[in-house]
Amino acid sequence: MKVIQIPKFLTPYGAIEFVPVNDVPGHTHRIALDGQLQMLWCPQGTPPNARQAQFFVRVIQALKEGLPKYHYTDCNADPPLSPGSSR
């Protein structure tokens, strides 16, 4: 049996997971938010860490809101929380 470790980070926007991939050249992990795989991959040489989790949350939220992909990362701002969410 092969056991794979999946780095997971909890954020106010959901759980970010870095799922290891072997079949995507130049990338080491695929990003999942709350268990749903996203069309985002972590480039080779960029280890999964809290800073990467924050980056991908900002990218995912911008795309969900119909904003440019790097809107929140360029502004160095966190997206607004949904009503009923707590930090």
Image: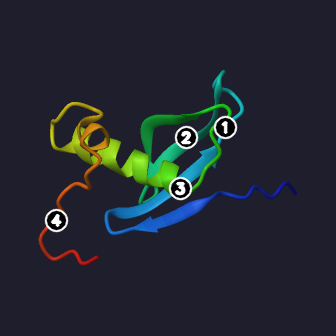
Instruction: Kindly check if marks 3 and 1 are in contact, taking CB atoms under 8 A apart as contact.
Output: no
**Mark 4 to mark 2: distance in Å?**
25 Å
Q: Earlier in the sequence, mark 2 or mark 3?
A: 3
Q: Earlier in the sequence, mark 1 or mark 4?
A: 1
- Residue type of the residue flagged with mark 1: Val
Mark 3, secondary structure of its residue: strand
**Mark 1 to mark 4: distance in Å?**
31 Å
**What residue sits right under mark 4 in the picture?**
82
**What residue sits right under mark 1 in the picture?**
21
Q: Position of residue 34 (x, y in %)?
A: 41, 60
Q: Position of residue 53 (x, y in %)?
A: 47, 53
Determine crowd level at label 3: few under 14, some 14-19, many 20+ residues with C-alpha closer than 10 A. many
Which numbered marker is on residue 30? 2
Q: Position of residue 17 (x, y in %)?
A: 53, 55
Quadrant position of the C terminus in the picture: bottom left
Q: Earlier in the sequence, mark 1 or mark 2?
A: 1
Mark 1, secondary structure of its residue: loop
**Mark 4 to mark 3: distance in Å?**
20 Å
**Mark 1 to mark 2: distance in Å?**
7 Å
In the displayed structure, 13 sits above or below 32; it is below
